[in-house]
Amino acid sequence: MKINYYSTVYKINRKQQNVTRISMNEYDYGMFPLNMDFKTLIQIVTKMQKICFQDSNTNRKNTIRLKKLLSETNEATVCIVISLGYPENETNIMNFVDGGSATLQKTNLGFLKYQQPVINEICRSKYNKTVMLGKPIKNVMNMIDKYVLLMMNSSTRINGVYLYIEKNPEHGTHLFLTSYYESYGFSIMTHDDNDYIYMYKSLEQ
């Protein structure tokens, strides 16, 4: 079975409760529409998170959480980056068999001088493990780098991209996760607290 991967950055519009596609040169956005309402986007993400976070979305709790996340204005989520794999000739956007996604939030993490782009909600969802699958998380991380560079061009206060890892994650270990993100160019920061390990990557403009 041939799997086609479609990838894009969706910029969040809180007032209109929708997202707008930001095309990246080397990525085929395929069946991703130019605009998508929050409801459809959240359906895609909750389907993915049933696999990667083992979140069954009982009583629509995850749907409600994601709607609040996309609507937040104080430490705003600025975009969601997504890469989904589909069987050849598939036309229904919900029928993906593999995928990766992440959100990008502007926050100072409680200790940075200025708000910076911070990666959250990193998710890999394999629905068909019997076929040769691609690397959607690699697509997502690369698109995040490209988008943050655009943010750096418009703000001298932004100095790179950040993420944080739970010291005691529910699934896996922080040692595996820190090693995994180091492979994407992140380094562990000296700042420390009881709950999280913070990581940072500088980007060359």
Image: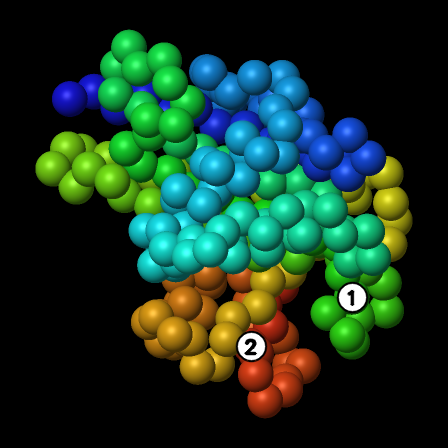
Q: Nearer the viewer, residue 117 or 124?
A: 124
What residue is drawn where x is 63% and y is 86%?
A: 193
Pointer 1 local density, CA inside 10 Å: few below 14, some 14–19, many at least 20: some
Query: What is the quadrant of the N terminus in the image?
Result: top left
The extreme left residue here reads: 130
Task: Tell me if residue 185 comes above or below residue 32 in the rendering.
Answer: below
What residue is drawn where x is 67% and y is 52%?
A: 68
What residue is drawn where x is 42% and y is 75%?
A: 169
Determine which quarter of the picture holds residue 116: bottom right
Task: Tell me if residue 136 comes above or below residue 172 in the rendering.
Answer: above
Query: What is the quadrant of the C terminus in the image?
Result: top right
Residue tagged 2: 197
The extreme top residue here reads: 89
Element type where label 1 sits in the image: loop
Residue tagged 1: 108
Q: Nearer the viewer, residue 55 or 25?
A: 55
Q: Nearer the viewer, residue 121 or 187?
A: 121
The extreme front residue here reads: 59
Q: Looking at numbered disc 1 in the image, what kind of residue is underneath it?
A: Asn
Residue 103 in the image, given as x and y percentages of width and height: 59, 48
Q: Earlier in the sequence, mark 1 or mark 2?
A: 1
Q: In this view of the protein, can residue 139 be seen by the observer?
A: no
Q: In this view of the protein, can residue 13 be seen by the observer?
A: yes
Task: Tell me if residue 98 comes above or below residue 159 in the rendering.
Answer: above
105 to the left or right of 3:
right
Residue 26 in the image, given as x and y percentages of width and height: 51, 22
